[in-house]
Image (cartoon, rainbow, N blue to C red):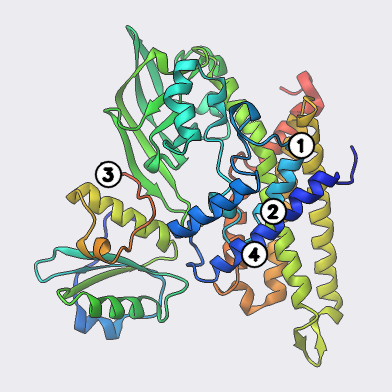
Amino acid sequence: MAIRLTKPWHDLNEAIPLLRGNLGVFELADKDGQVLYIGFAGGKSLYGLKGEVRDLSARITSATQVRHEVNTAYQSRFRELLMVHVADYGKLPPYNIELNHQPGRLGRISPA
Amino acid sequence: MDLNLTEEQDMIVGMVRRFVREEVLPLELDLDPDADELKPEDQDRLVEKTKAMGLYGLDIPPAYGGPDIDLVTRTLIAMEMSQHRAGLYAPCYGTFGGAGLAQLFEATDDQKERYLYPTLRGEKRGFFGLSEPSGGSDPARAIQTKAVQDGDDWIINGGKLWISGADRADFGLVFARSDSDKGRNGVTCFIVDTDTPGFHVRRIVHTLRSAHYATELQFEDMRIPATNILGEVNRGFAIANDRLTRQRIPYAAGCIGVALKAHEMALEYVPQRETFGAPLSTRQSIQWMLVDNEIDIKQSIWITLEAANKANLGEPFRKEAAMAKLVATEAGGRVVDRCMQMFGGLGVAKDLPFERWFREMRIRRIGEGPSEVQRHVIARELLGSSLR
């Protein structure tokens, strides 16, 4: 499994009806592909990835694209994606900060 | 060994049991089923409670401000602390504090000032870096990370695998081969700051555990001063080995706690759940599962407490610790599996904790030395020098 999320981006409006209730992780981005938010659908998520992406996209109105990965290890994958984002860009995605959706103490990673 | 709890042990166990049931379990209703941390405000509130109970920093020696608790009582507490969903790998979500790395109690005064005391104050975190891609069960031979002396410093190159907490740590104990010709007598333990140039956390290793992950580390020409050697040059294996032996007792106790909780839930459930016009509890197949659970749990408890008692008395306990780890991890897996079966579909859903325990309990037969290594340790103790 690649460290970075390598799934293709999809238009949000087209993708949401096709998403299913799986566990997993996802990224929301603006029209330029800048990642705005990294999230996960966990055991408490109503309707899994479909519900989480739908709810978050309603709160993050500048998001136009989504990509996702079905993954039962969603907690560790979520943290890994956040760590990689910090390694690449020096900070968390803006809406993880604004919505305070981040682990208590995020680790540091320096992918090869 | 006296099989009865003392009045003090009974009181402490009861206090921890109430804490888990009244403080921890209610919080888990709102957490993600795979969570391993509480909200900061809940964490702080519960830490204040464990401090008020006089049980914060359970593994810190009294000389360093920890409570004076013997190892048998500590084992009984560990059996209580794990009786919740996250209990196997995050007992009470760390609200009882930790000792950091126990090996640092043997450090030099300078090392204690720089690493031990800040860890005890909660200002620094450490990791334990022993296992490598070449193997973890036989560290004396498997360690390929090399340390070469260069003046007053040592240059370390290599890597580690399956290391918990390295990505969030400020420092770690890194075991490296300092003499390639001396086997287990050629390993040195270094205290490594994680901001040292050449220290890299390359990736997270995703496993059956979702939240509590391991990491892979790489060291590239990492320069470590000789003042950061823990213990003596080429004597690091003894530090690692002591830790591996001691760790087996609380590791076993955590599995017993989860087995106790799973068994308790099944005992409550089967008289209520009806199939084909009668409660599950009337079915012999269910009764036998409960009986097997009871036997698995009881034998695990006594073998683990015997190991703790021997360690407490200062007697050799390597064989007993290996037996405890072997029996409790394997029995714990069987108990959780039977309970899942009794709960049917609910048993595998994330609504209940069994599926998390099932995944995490499976790791326990491998972590801290797999069952086969424990059997090897026991055989070596039984056969002594005749075993080659």
Q: Is residue A35 above or below residue B371?
A: below
Q: Which residue in the structure is indicated by mark 4? A: B22
Q: Is residue B30 left or right of residue B307?
A: left
Report whether mark 3 lies on the same chain as mark 2. no
Cα separation, mark 3 vs mark 2, equals 42 Å
Name which quarter of the figure residue A16 lies in: bottom left
Q: Which residue in the structure is indicated by mark 3? A: A111
| Neighbour tally class for label 3: few under 14, some 14-19, many 20 plus, Cα within 10 Å | some
Cα separation, mark 2 vs mark 1, equals 19 Å
| Neighbour tally class for label 2: few under 14, some 14-19, many 20 plus, Cα within 10 Å | many
- Give percent across and percent down for residue B298: 83, 53
Name which quarter of the figure residue B159 lies in: top left
Point out which mark residue B16 bears.
2
Cα separation, mark 3 vs mark 1, equals 42 Å
Q: Is residue B186 above or below residue B316?
A: above
Q: Which residue in the structure is indicated by mark 1? A: B308
Name which quarter of the figure residue A50 lies in: bottom left
- Residue that lies at the very extreme toward the left in this rendered image: A32
